Every structure is written in C-alpha cells, then in structure tokens.
Amino acid sequence: MRWETPEEAAAAVAGSSSYLDSLYGSVTPQRHDPPPSIQTPAAGVPRRVDATAPAVRPQGSLSARVELDASDQGLAAGQYAVLYDSHGACFGCGVILQGAVGGGDDAME
Amino acid sequence: MAITRSATLVRHLTDLCDLSASAFATKRLTPLRSPCCSPPSAEPEAAPLRVALLLSGGVDSSLALNLACAAGHTVTAFYLQIWFQEDFRNFWDACPWEDDLAYARAVCDQARVQLRVVPLTCHYWDHVVSACVADIAAGRTPNPDVLCNSRIKFGAFMEYLHSEHAGQFDRVASGHYARLDRWPTHDGTGAALPPILRCCADAVKDQTYFLAALSPAQLASAMFPLGALPKASVRTLAQAGRLPPAERKDSQGICFLGKVKFSEFVAQHLGTCPGSFVDADTGRRVGTHNGVWFYTIGQRKGIQLSGGPWYVVSKDPGRNLVYISSAYHAADKRRSTFRVGLFSWLGDARPAQGRNSGLRVKVRVAMRHFPPSMALLTRASLRCAMDQRHTAPA
C-alpha cells in the first residue's frame, strides 16, 4: 500500500472510520455511560443509586492554555493531558491540540 | 491448601498494613467475615457487592480478583477477547489469547470463581484501532490505552453486561493501579456523591492517566482493588497466595500492538508516503522519510542521517514534512506551554485557573526507568478561554 500524498492516505483512513467519528469523534475522549443494570452503591450505604445521570460531555469550543513549570520536549498533538490537584485527585483530561505547543509566554497567543 | 494460601495472604496483607496503616485503614476491616483482610480499595465495608471483574490472566488482575473475593464480594470474572481481526493474525505473530486465557482459567479455578469469555475484538477494532490509525495518519499521537478503557473495558463491556446480564452487577473491577475514594454520604438530593479518582500508592505504576477519560457514571461503577498497593507488594502477595501468574512477566507496550512493532503496524495500515526531513534550525532539506506517521515528537530512532543525532521537533502532516534538529536540547527547543481542548471531566470539580493553583499535569505515563521522584506530575498553571481557533485537533 502506498499513497501519493498524505491527504490521500488520511482520506482513505478517514473513510474507513467515518461512522466512528459520528459516534465518538476521532480523538474526542467521549465515553460510554454504563447502562441501568450497573448501579452504584455508596461506600457503607446500602441504598443503590442509578448511575445513568447524563455525563459531562467534552466542550468542543473550550480550550485552555497550560503552562508547565518545567520544559517537556515530548509534547505532541493528540496526547492526553491529565489534570490533578496538588493532592493527586484527578479532574479529568483534555487533548493537546495541533499547532499549539510552544516554548515561551507568547507562543500560544 | 486453600487455608494455607489464605493464611499466607493474611500475614502478608497484615505486614503491608503495618507498613502502610493509612492506606489500608486496618481497623475498618472485618477479617472474620472474609478469609483474609482486604484493602479499602476493594470496598469491604460495602460487601457483598456483585462484581464483574476484568481478568486478563496477568498478575495484577489476578490479585485484584482475589482481593475482591476476600472483601466478601460475589465475583464473576470476564476475559475480554481483544485482538486483531482474524485476517491480521496472518501477518504477525500469534496473539497471546491462548496463553492469557489459560492463566485466567487457572486463577478462576483456584479462586472458585466463574469465568466468562466476551468476544470484543470487533468493538476494539472499530472503536480503538481505527481511531488510532486515523490519528496517526493525521500526524497526531493517540493513546490506545486511554481509548480502550473508556470505550471497551468500561464502555462496550458495560453494554454487554446490560445486554446479557442486566441488573446482575454493581461494579466493574479491574487490576488498574488507581485509587477511588468514595464518600459515605449523599448530597441533598439523595444522590451519591461522585467518587474521586486519585493517584495510587505506586507513583511509577500509577495508571490514573489511562482512566482519566472515563465518564462520571463509568467511574461510579468502577472498583480498583489494587489502589493502595505498590507493584512490589502485588507481586509479593501473588507469590504468597500462589496465584498461577505470580511469576509472569508484566505486559509491555501499547496494548493492541502486543508483539508487533509500531513501525510495522503503521506501515501495514498506512503504507509509505515519502517526504522531506527539514533541518528545523536552517530550513534546509536534509533527507527523505517514508511517511510523516512513522515519527513522533522527540523521536531519535529511525533518522539515519549524518551530522546527528537528530530528533524530531515538529511535523507538518499537510505538507508531509518532518522537522528535525541536531540541537534538540538547546534552549530555543524547550517546550513549556501548550493548548488543550476536548475536555473530559470525571466529576463536577474543575481545576482552578492561574498560577499557584496547585494544578499538576501529566502528559504521559511514567516509564519504568524513571525513579519514583519523577512521577511526571508537573506543576502547571491553566488559563481557560472560549477559543474558536483551536476547537479541534486539526
């Protein structure tokens, strides 16, 4: 298999997975929610709670600029950036956007 | 035999509890109810829960199964058949299905737990492999393990449970190294407060990175019995309990690739598309590559040009250019800022913006050769904005 241009290759791949994009998005970290059969008892509490509340969906138009205290030369578009508080509690994640990696204060703007 | 095994596990768990009392909260355990004590990450106080445990045949999930049983839960093991479609097996080495499944069966026989095999190869292909190939073709760096957790292990598998075992399970447990803190109270509406995903006791082994794209509902249904254990202790406990995979090597690398080299996988799916290596410092064309998708930022391997070593510093998929530098570690190559989008939150909490917010960021998992002090949790500051310029990873 050999493509003449990167666009041609990308189009071929995109064509084979286009229905996936409609379900999940290409790299959008959307999730399956558990069905009603999976229930969630709280620790030590016998009461069972339905876990089918709507999930927080990715907000496509929201982006954030992240500035690290240290240099990281391995940053690449598509990588997940996972966010934690100072005690190791995880908030969730985002995806590093293409063309949005820089080295200085003004590199992002 | 079983009594001896349990007694040994009790002794080792007790030793660990003594070493890490805060992690185990031993006083809350009720060892008389179960054959041995169990860490709080296995929710012994909520027993008996009906637990669907994801068993791979490796040492981690095997110990997780034993800890869930020891906590007093009713456990059913599920082995997810995830691999390439049949025709892809013709290209590469045989998949490890048979070996993994044999270990899984041995673990279940020993623990007297029912094992079910769930074929999810097609789901995996459609929802993980295809998405990764598309991302690689577009010059991005996907993470199949993150997708596998949110779309398969806690996604398609949960849908399978709903379809085939509706109403029969309370939790989906796995051998991930992550802590899940649950609140013993409800909010004002009577709904359970969402659990909090936390880094595990083993900073190097921590796998919260791979679980960060779960939905709040997926997380609420999850259980990670190994959350309080460092890897070395898991191995010790598995040996003490004489678990069949106690001496088995850990799996390495990208989950779906198994024994297949990344470059071979990419070549098989995307072929080649020759383009130019460009010296990022001079703008001169210095060589030819076989396709922008074979390279990732920071890569050194595979660039066999004189005047090196050369490292990939950026890519331009649209023009099929790979920018490389022989001064990769120079000050002007340092990267400390990036823009992130397509957020996925585990609960209602959001990170504070600005400096001194205490925010930490992890952009990859720790590799085994990093010392524990380098957990790759980097201090960072965040500034959010509704920004239309970067709404998708173009």
Image (cartoon, rainbow, N blue to C red):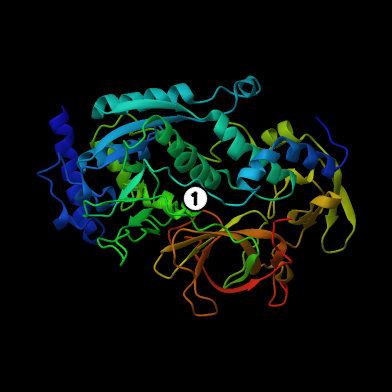
Q: Nearer the viewer, residue B34 or B314?
A: B34
- Residue occupying image coordinates x 34% and y 61%: B193
Relative horizontal placement of residue B259, taking residue B357 as reference (left or right): right
Q: How packed is label 1: few (under 14 Cα within 10 Å), some, or many (20 or more)?
A: many
B272 shown above or below A79: above
On screen, residue B380 above or below B34? below
Image quadrant containing the C terminus of chain B? bottom right
Using the rendered view, name the quadrant where residue A105 is placed.
bottom right
Q: Nearer the viewer, residue B228 or A22?
A: A22
**Residue drawn at the location 60% of the way across and 25% of the way down:** B85
Give the tally of numbered discs: 1
User: Which residue corresponds to mark 1?
Assistant: B210
Tell me the kind of residue under disc 1. Answer: Phe
For residue A15, above or below residue B316: above
Q: Position of residue B79 (x, y in %)?
A: 41, 30
Residue B171 locus on image (x, y percent): 33, 43
Q: Against B362, is B215 above or below?
A: above
